[in-house]
Image: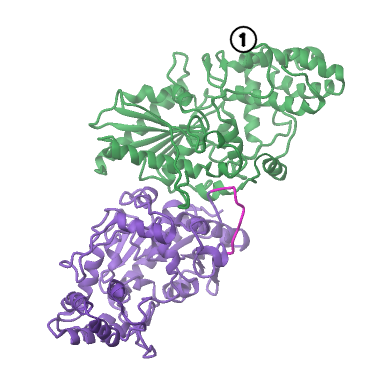
Chain colours: A purple, B green
Amino acid sequence: IDHFGFNSVKTFNQRYLIANEYWKKDGGSILFYTGNEGDIVWFCNNTGFMWDVAQELKAMLVFAEHRYYGESLPFGKNSFKDSRHLNYLTSEQALADFAELIRHLQETIPGVKNQPVIAIGGSYGGMLAAWFRMKYPHMVVGALAASAPIWQFEDLVPCGVFMKIVTSDFKRSGPYCSETIRKSWNVINQLSTTSRGLQYLTEVLHLCTPLTPRDVQHLKDWIAETWVNLAMVDYPYPSSFLQPLPAWPIKVVCQYLKNPNVSDSLMIQNIFQALNIYYNYSGEAQCLNVSTTTTSNLGSLGWSYQACTEIVMPFCTNGIDDMFEPHAWNLKEFSDECFKQWGVRPSPSWITTMYGGKNINSHTNIVFSNGELDPWSGGGVTEDLTDTLVAFTISEGAHHLDLRASNALDPISVQLARTLETKHVKNWIRDFYRSGLQH
Amino acid sequence: IDHFGFNSVKTFNQRYLIANEYWKKDGGSILFYTGNEGDIVWFCNNTGFMWDVAQELKAMLVFAEHRYYGESLPFGKNSFKDSRHLNYLTSEQALADFAELIRHLQETIPGVKNQPVIAIGGSYGGMLAAWFRMKYPHMVVGALAASAPIWQFEDLVPCGVFMKIVTSDFKRSGPYCSETIRKSWNVINQLSTTSRGLQYLTEVLHLCTPLTPRDVQHLKDWIAETWVNLAMVDYPYPSSFLQPLPAWPIKVVCQYLKNPNVSDSLMIQNIFQALNIYYNYSGEAQCLNVSTTTTSNLGSLGWSYQACTEIVMPFCTNGIDDMFEPHAWNLKEFSDECFKQWGVRPSPSWITTMYGGKNINSHTNIVFSNGELDPWSGGGVTEDLTDTLVAFTISEGAHHLDLRASNALDPISVQLARTLETKHVKNWIRDFYRSGLQH
């Protein structure tokens, strides 16, 4: 459980999945998915890219679950009990888990020892893939870090860039779409001042529980997060990542958000139609539940703790460059909330101290990919840093579209990115075998 | 105190020394000594190389004390109380301390932020310097790792190489010197079988406390460690590192160890004369104390714990390639002793998992220096690995002689090494300023 101390010898069961259908002991490779904040089976099923290239790379696929997520709970049901039990939920421990797992595979599966390992991950898992190559380059010959916002820390990028990209997605997906959303907040605020208004909101938005004055901020946060999630999964074909959705879901949503100048009541009816696309595309929901915005495959508890400790990402809005209500980044406020919830306070500069911030050019063999539609691209590496730290931008891509299985409706930009990514991976494999670095 | 967990917010005072006499804000540099297992003032006074090059490099000198040594005790007097208090004594925590300290200096001393930092260390501190460059290349542009046995782990080098080099030092320092020592163990064993013999050993060796049968193994270990220490500090001029000693102390010692075929009683008298050089060169000791072999500036408690956890170095002897009694490396036995003393068990493969073992070629800008007389060179990097991972061997050098102040009696080999080391450091500094990587 603790790689960095020797007082406790406790261990835990880490889940990992292996697919060796296409693996060849002769000249093969190991594609190692550095699991992120969720159930590894779900990530496995949403990372078709690895399955698509397995045969060409004669690759064994390994999907390693991140501690404190899915079934890899260090203290079982007590894992999230308090800050003492959560103490071992850090990126450093997770990377060490991956290192120990690779070593275990090398020592227990004949043939693995003499093969190159490539780290692959998306989002936080992409950050882990990049960091793993940086910190354990003896373990992996290279890393594919898809949609990995490794610079969404401290003041490395402007705190407003994330919401600006969300807004731009809505702006380009339908006339007056972002303007309509920008106007909607005040309509909600106005309606919230009377009990009749609150009742109207409850009814028209089909909320599962009646809205009270103290829930209004939460309702707006929930709606804003819905727009954010739509920006992340604005994929070109019907998909079911965070929720089941149609192709280009923002375009569908924006069909209901064409007119910022309608009456307050009509505005709310339109907002509901838009939300209903995201939360009820299957048509099965009886009401909308404001307590969650996403699949339960993501570990929201663990992630909330991580955001309150290491993974401190400053976000802000100003209502001008974006379609949200203005909100400055307030570390003090954030820290107090963290302390209330978890009994810990964030260390906002630690990740930069640990992983180098923008000063990472001495590393090698990392491909950073980003979708231009993806709000996380704002904190990502979108330009080549060196010959071997390269960046691919997918103009029509949302959040790690490139890691998804190939699809007939894939835009050219993601097809090209996947081809180039595969080329780099093949070069790393080739260099490994040429160098004679096998054990 | 804990960089890798957020449950405890406890801090401690880390000691560091700064010399800025020659520092220039314009075009200068920071030489950062990565402190090892002892009092930082003592290391500072024994690392004259940094002082000698300060002016040429316009350098600020920083000497950072390693946690749990000197005055940098996380829990004061309780620091070594039990494995709970010792839990934060690891190389990873120490490296993170260095990273935080550099960041602190960058943020509090105007001018530091825009200057290149170079890590310098010797022995375990040399390992830390190399590992620091490997793990935090964004913090230091390069590292000088003097006499750093980063490969004295697992089976990366033969476990007998260390004692073989000790033996070879004695062999070349006087006729029949190593043969005499090889023969001495049996003489001690023989004498130890009778109480008269034990008394003779006590008297002739001037032991402070009478020898009992159960102390005999400890006595032999203590004598063996004395020969080891002499090999480490076999410097070409009078020095006072582990003990005050004459120039080329092994030569002096070997003058008493010329004849392996003397009587048992004369053998012991000769051994005493030899030991007396090491323990009583000043002539002030009333008796020889077998409870210690070295200066109290080294933190033997902390080091014993580190050796029992992470820094697990396999040593062995066979009495043929070396002059010691045969002793195989026995991890089980070692582990049991560790558990008895500290309540912890060693993780012998962890350092290799963490720092890469021999597979470190993707790193850059590390100079490894080793003295051929130094037993630690057996576990060191003694050949160039790449263009930027280079090795210098100092044919007449003992343990990190190159880090000591320049001396009129320095052999050419160490002068040359220092010149080349300085050249590399200057190139790193030049590259830093050329790259425009200043913040």
Question: Could you classify mark 1 by the number of other residues whose Cα lies within 10 Å: few (under 14), some (14-19), or many (20 or more)?
Answer: few
Say if B240 sits above or below A124 in the image.
above
Name the foreground residue: A439 vs B335.
Answer: B335
**Quick check: B230 left or right of B337?**
left
Secondary structure at numbered mark 1:
loop
Please, which residue is most extreme toward the front here?
Answer: A195
* Residue at x 83% of width, y 20% of height: B191
Say if B178 sits above or below A127 in the image.
above
- Kindly tell me whether residue A28 is visible in this rendering: yes
* Residue at x 30% of width, y 80% of height: A236
Please, which residue is most extreme toward the left here?
Answer: A261
Indicate the amino acid at tag 1.
Glu
Please, which residue is most extreme toward the top here?
Answer: B283
Q: Position of residue A393 (x, y in %)?
A: 28, 66
Magenta stretch: residue A6 in it? yes
Name the foreground residue: A63 vs B372.
Answer: A63
Name the foreground residue: B271 vs A380.
Answer: A380
Say if B90 sits above or below A173 in the image.
above
Label 1 chain ID: B
